Amino acid sequence: MRRNRIDLDLLIILDAIYTEGGITRASKRINLTQPAISHALGRLRELFGDPLFVREGRAVTPTPLTRNLIGPLRQALRGLETVLNDAERFDPAVASNRFAIAVRDVLEASLLPGFMERVARTAPGIEINTVYVNRRDLEAELGAGTVDVAFDLLLPFTGAIHRRRVALDQVVVVVWT
C-alpha cells in the first residue's frame, strides 16, 4: 500500500481501536462490523509494517509505534474536523433539524423552559425531542448519535465527549424536624 493513497477512514479506525482498547468496542463506536475493523487493521499493519496492537486477553495493547503515532494523528484528525465544520457552518435561523436532548428529570423544570424559548426565538425550524437516558449509557448514546446533546452532571467521560459547564447551582436541602 502506498502512503500517498491512504484512506482517511483507516486513520479514524486506528484512533477508535486505540481509544476503545479493542476491535469490538471500536466497531460499536464507529458503527462498522468487527470484520470491517479487522480488515482495516490488516491494511494499517501493511501500511506501517507493524502489528500496531497486540492482544492481551480480551483487550489489545498498542505497540510503541502506535503510541508514538496517536498524538499527532489525533491532532491531525481534529484539525481536519475543524476545517470540515467551518465549511458547513450551521445557521440556526434557516436550519430545519431535529435534535434529541437527554435531560435529567430534576433539570427539566429549571433548565428546559428558558432553553426551549431561546431555541424557538433564534431557530424556529429546529425541533427538540427530550429523551431519558440512563447515566451509564449516556456516552454510548452520544457516540452512537441516538442523543445529540445531554444536560447532566460533569461525569467522567473519555475524551471523545465534548462538554461545557452551562450552570453552577448550589444544592439546598430543607428538612422539617
Image (cartoon, helix red, strand yellow):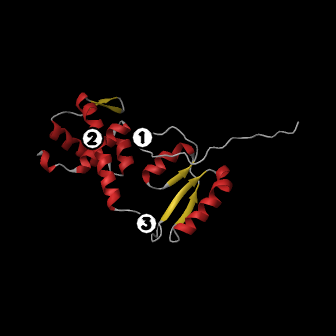
CB-based contact (under 8 Å), mark 2 and mark 1: no
Residue 24 is situated, as x and y percent measured from the top left of the image, at 36, 42
Mark 1 — residue?
A: 159
Residue 26 is situated, as x and y percent measured from the top left of the image, at 35, 43
In the foreground, 106 or 57: 106
User: Which of the 4 image quadrants contains residue 39?
Assistant: top left
Quarter in which the N terminus is drawn:
top left
Q: Is residue 34 visible?
A: no
Relative side of 52 to 144, left or right: left
Mark 1 against mark 3, which lies toward the viewer? 3
Q: Is 64 rendered above or below residue 99?
A: above
Mark 3 — residue?
A: 91
Residue 82 is situated, as x and y percent measured from the top left of the image, at 33, 52
Specify the farthest residue to the left.
2
Dot 1 or dot 3: first in sequence order is 3
Q: CA distance from mark 2 to mark 1?
A: 14 Å
Q: Residues within 10 Å of mark 1 (few under 14, many from 20)?
A: few
User: Which of the 4 image quadrants contains residue 53?
Assistant: top left
Mark 2 — residue?
A: 73
What SS does tag 3 mark?
loop
What SS does tag 2 mark?
helix
Relative side of 111 to 28, left or right: right
Amino acid on which disc 2 is placed: Leu
Q: CA distance from mark 1 to mark 3?
A: 27 Å
Q: Is 23 rendered above or below residue 30?
A: above
Amino acid on which disc 3 is placed: Asp
